Amino acid sequence: TSFPAQKISLIRNNIRLISLLRIGDILTILKDLAQQPYLQIPETLNSEITDNIEINKNSSNQNSLSAVKERKDLYEEGINLFNIKPLEGIIFFINHGFFNDEPDSIAAFFHQEERLDPNQIGQVLGRAELNWLAVMHKYVELINIKDMDFLPALRLFLYKFRLPGEGQKIDRLMEKFASHYCESNPNSEYFMVADVAYLLAYSIIMLTTDLHNPTVKHKISSSQYIEMNHNPDDTTNFPDEYLLKIYDSIKKNEIKLKSNISKSPFSSKFLLDPTIPSDLSKIAKMSLYGQKQMSSASDSFVEEIETSDATRSMFITIWKQLLVCLGWVINETNDENTIYQCLNCIILCIRISCLYKLELTRRTFISSLLPFSMLSKCTINLQDLKSKNIAVIRAILLIAREDGNFLAESWHEILVVISNLQIIQYSKKSHTRSSSLSLLFDVKEAPKQPIWRPL
């Protein structure tokens, strides 16, 4: 026997609602633990001097461990920020002392950190400002391509970042690579001048695109590629065998980025699905690039840490997945109870973020609410506001009231909503309150079961 579609939908909604309730319970526990003060150990204890020394030693070790853990969490937050807004991420790292603002330090960071989004690295390296040009030059110069053949050197160069889409940015990167290759290989048979290396590098990039882009129907042949690299003046000609070797190598193995994205429940198809709202796609992408690469050490050990530190670590581990899941459910459902539970979980996450001073987490959760409020712009028609949007607006106003002292830069998003709400609420012509928004302000006109209830 098969269940009717309506019954299946009801069962699915019930399972979803129960899951959200359990998530809310867990977040409530984390919030309560975060609000508890640290355990205070008296300075004087009625015990032996040796016991005092041992206790002070253990306390010092715990404080040191807490400081290291906090530093590590800051570093993880910086990586997540870079993968969304790279320039802000770099400033975050510099302000917290992870490296200085010298081009050498920034370039070395790009090489050493494996979890950076290669697209964002490419965008930074392609910038035309003098300070970022210096970073790009240092980045290229740190690549050891001495005594390497040209194609393996180019593969190594393009291993950790994706070339930006603009031609001028690609030109600057290719010119610097060509210059660096010639300087690293002064005795090369074919690359005595940087222009020769530049032209061949560009032709290899074009060949890769032509052979491996599915939208290109008529692929270039080996003879056409060889002819393309021959010049009438014979100044930059390569032996046919050398060019044919490059052609065969690219045909068998295209130039690829290093695969540095850890396993995630969200695939690239999810990110490229045109039916997915752009805001949710960005949230999912942030979660995808923000996954931590856990070490696979065989010897595990247990450390004694403060309860607050353990709670903070638990929340940092799960917040990105919660962000995507809660945003997805709000976007998909119109059930009032489900929406309420989602918003309740988001407000709890924002409260925990404020208590632990997780700036990026707080900003991300608040920003994720804006698209659902439909008040990011004041050009909305009042008829388009649904009960879901009103519930989100109420949640944003509640966040402003309850956690206003901790919102810092996030007040910008809150004030945008409040300002646009004020513009829509009062007509420029009549200066009278719109009845379409009375649900937000007039208790007597609100439904008996309000969509949003304060915590």
Image (cartoon, grey):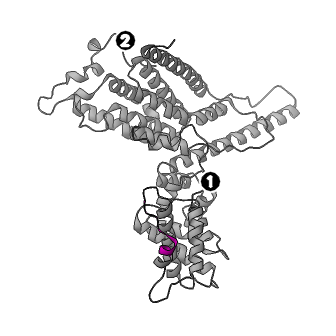
Residue nearest the observer in this picture, 203 or 326: 203
User: Considering only vertical position in the picture, is 138 above or below 378?
Assistant: below
Q: Nearer the viewer, mark 1 or mark 2?
A: 1
Question: Seen in the image, is 31 located left or right of residue 301?
Answer: left
Question: Seen in the image, is 386 located left or right of residue 112?
Answer: left
Could you tell me residue 105's position as x and y percent? 59, 63
Could you tell me residue 40's position as x and y percent? 69, 28
Q: Is residue 175 visible?
A: no
The image quarter in which residue 426 lies: top left
Residue matched to label 2: 449
Could you tell me residue 104's position as x and y percent? 58, 66
Residue matched to label 1: 114
Q: Is residue 220 magenta?
A: yes
User: What is the chief secondary structure element of the magenta stretch?
Assistant: loop
Describe the element under mark 2 as helix, strand or loop.
Answer: loop
Three-letter code for the amino acid on which mark 1 is drawn: Glu
Q: Is residue 189 visible?
A: yes
Residue nearest the observer in this picture, 344 or 414: 344
Q: Which comes sooner in the sequence, label 1 or label 2? A: 1
Could you tell me residue 206's position as x and y percent? 47, 67
Three-letter code for the amino acid on which mark 2 is drawn: Gln
Q: Which residues are magenta?
A: 216-225
The residue drawn where x is 46% and y is 24% is 342
| Residue ranking furthest to the left | 429
Describe the element under mark 1 as helix, strand or loop.
Answer: loop
The residue drawn where x is 61% and y is 60% is 111
Q: Is residue 145 magenta?
A: no
The residue drawn where x is 59% and y is 54% is 97
Q: How would you rate the neighbour count of disc 1 (Cα within 10 Å): few for under 14, some for 14-19, many for 20 or more?
A: some
Question: Seen in the image, is 354 located left or right of residue 150?
Answer: left
Residue nearest the observer in this picture, 109 or 149: 149
